[in-house]
């Protein structure tokens, strides 16, 4: 059972990311501070964005791994059930 996202959900996630990042960039650009402080805040924003992307990739990979392991375990169990004969003489 695959989880499929709709095109609207994908668009909303991408648009939300760009709107929030853009608003933060505009906010940093219009702050009444000197260039060094503005650059520091910009680097902090970039670090936050890259960390969020990395975290989402790690979580996705972990979920895909658990789904794969679950499918392998399910296949093993199905094989054991189909091979099991309760009336077979154990001798």
Image (tube, rainbow, N blue to C red):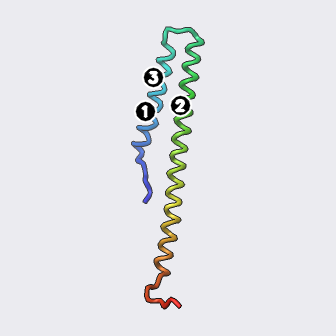
Location of residue 39 in the rendering, given as x and y in whole percent from the top left corner: 58, 17
Mark 2 or 3, closer to the camera? 2
Picture coordinates of residue 80, whole percent (x, y)? 50, 76
Q: Which residue is drawn at 42% across and 45% down?
A: 7
- The residue most toward the front is 91
Q: Mark 2 points at which residue?
A: 49
Q: Check the image and report above or below for 35 versus 5.
A: above
Choose the circle earlier in sequence order: 1 or 3: 1
- Answer above or below: position of 23 versus 53: above
Using the image as rendered, state which of residue 59 and residue 19 is in the foreground. Answer: 59
Q: Could you tell me how far apart the alpha carbons at marks 1 and 3 are, in whole angstroms?
A: 10 Å
Mark 2 neighbour density, 10 Å: few (under 14) some (14–19) many (20 or more): some
State which tag comes first along the sequence, 1 or 2.
Answer: 1
Q: Mark 1 points at which residue?
A: 16
Tell me the mark number nearer the camera, choosing from 1 and 2: 2
Residue 66's tag is none
**11 lies left or right of 34:** left
Q: Mark 3 points at which residue?
A: 23
Residue 74, x across and y down, in percent: 48, 67
Classify mark 1: helix, strand or loop: helix
Helix, strand or loop at mark 2: helix
In 3D space, how far apart are the residues under numbered discs 2 and 3 (Cα atoms)?
A: 13 Å
Which is nearer the eye, 55 or 2? 55
Q: Which of 68 and 35 is in front in this view?
A: 68
The quadrant holding residue 53 is: top right
Residue drawn at x 53%, y 39% is: 55
Q: Residues within 10 Å of mark 1 (few under 14, many from 20)?
A: few
2 or 3: tag closer to the N-terminus: 3
Q: Residue 70 location in percent, x, y?
A: 49, 61
The relative height of residue 63 versus residue 17 in the rendered view (above or below) is below
Quote the CA–CA distance across marks 1 and 2: 13 Å
């Amino acid at each position: 059972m695959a989880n499929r996202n709709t095109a609207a959900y994908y668009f909303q996630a991408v648009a939300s990311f760009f709107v929030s990042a853009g608003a933060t960039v505009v906010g940093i650009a219009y702050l009444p501070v000197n260039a060094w402080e503005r650059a520091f805040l910009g680097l902090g924003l970039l670090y936050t964005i890259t960390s969020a992307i990395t975290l989402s990739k790690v979580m996705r990979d972990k979920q895909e791994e658990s789904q794969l392991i679950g499918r392998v375990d399910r296949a093993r169990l199905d094989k054991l059930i189909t091979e099991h004969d309760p009336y077979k003489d154990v001798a």
